[in-house]
Amino acid sequence: MGKLHDQMQEDLVLKAYSPNTQRSYLRCARNFAKHYMRSPEEMGEQEVRDFLLFLVRDRQAFPATLDMYVSALKFLYNITLKRPEVVKGISRPKRPQTLPVILSPEEVLRLFAAIRSVKHKAIIATAYAPGLRISEVCGLRIADHERQFEDFH
C-alpha cells in the first residue's frame, strides 16, 4: 500500500485529523488491503462489505472497532481514492449506550487512603470530582482555574 498509504496519510494531515486517528485509520486500511492481498484501488463495494462482515462474524469485532473501520474505509474511498460510490451504502454500526462505572463512597475513600502523595491526591480529586476525562485533565491550565474563580465573583 506504499504510495496509497502516503497519499492517505497526507490527506489525514491536511484534514487535521489527530495523530491517533491517523494511525488508526492507516492501520485499518492496511488490514483491509492485507486481508485481500490487493490494493484498495483494485477493490470495490463488495470487498468492503465482505471485509466488514468478516470483522463482525469471524473476528467478533466490537461495535466501536467496527465503527473505526467504517470511518477509515469511508475516508479512504471518499477522500483519498475519490470513489465515494464504493462506500455510499455502508452505514455505521449501532453502538450500545453504556453508563460509566461510579465508585461507591467507600471505594473513593479507600482510593484516597491508598495515595500517599498530596500532589497525587490533588490530581485525582481534581479529575474525579467533576468527572473529567483523562484528556481533559491533561489539558488543564492555570488560566482555567483563574477563569473559574472569576465566574463566581
Image (cartoon, rainbow, N blue to C red):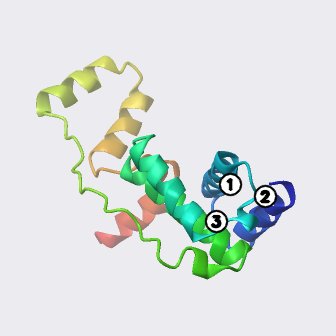
Labelled pair 2, 1 in contact (Cβ < 8 Å): yes
108 or 102: nearer the eye? 102
Residue 17 circle label: 3
Mark 3 / mark 2, whichever is N-terminal: 2
Inspect the image, locate mark 2, and give the three-letter code of the amino acid beneath it. His
Q: Secondary structure at mark 3?
A: loop
Residue 5 circle label: 2
Q: CA distance from mark 3 to mark 2?
A: 15 Å
Q: CA distance from mark 2 to mark 1?
A: 7 Å
Mark 3 / mark 1, whichever is N-terminal: 3
Quadrant location of residue 91? Answer: bottom left
**Classed neighbour count for the residue bearing mark 3: other residues with Cα under 10 Å, few (<14), some (14–19), many (≥20):** some
Inspect the image, locate mark 1, and give the three-letter code of the amino acid beneath it. Leu
Q: Locate residue 145, reporting x and y percent.
A: 42, 58
Mark 2 / mark 1, whichever is N-terminal: 2
Residue position marked by numbered label 1 in the rendering? 26
Inspect the image, locate mark 3, and give the three-letter code of the amino acid beneath it. Tyr
**Classed neighbour count for the residue bearing mark 1: other residues with Cα under 10 Å, few (<14), some (14–19), many (≥20):** many
Labelled pair 3, 2 in contact (Cβ < 8 Å): no
- Residue 112 left/right relative to 105: right
Quarter of the image with the N terminus is bottom right
Q: Locate residue 127, reporting x and y percent.
A: 36, 45
Task: Answer above or below: position of 96 versus 84.
Answer: above
**Classed neighbour count for the residue bearing mark 2: other residues with Cα under 10 Å, few (<14), some (14–19), many (≥20):** some
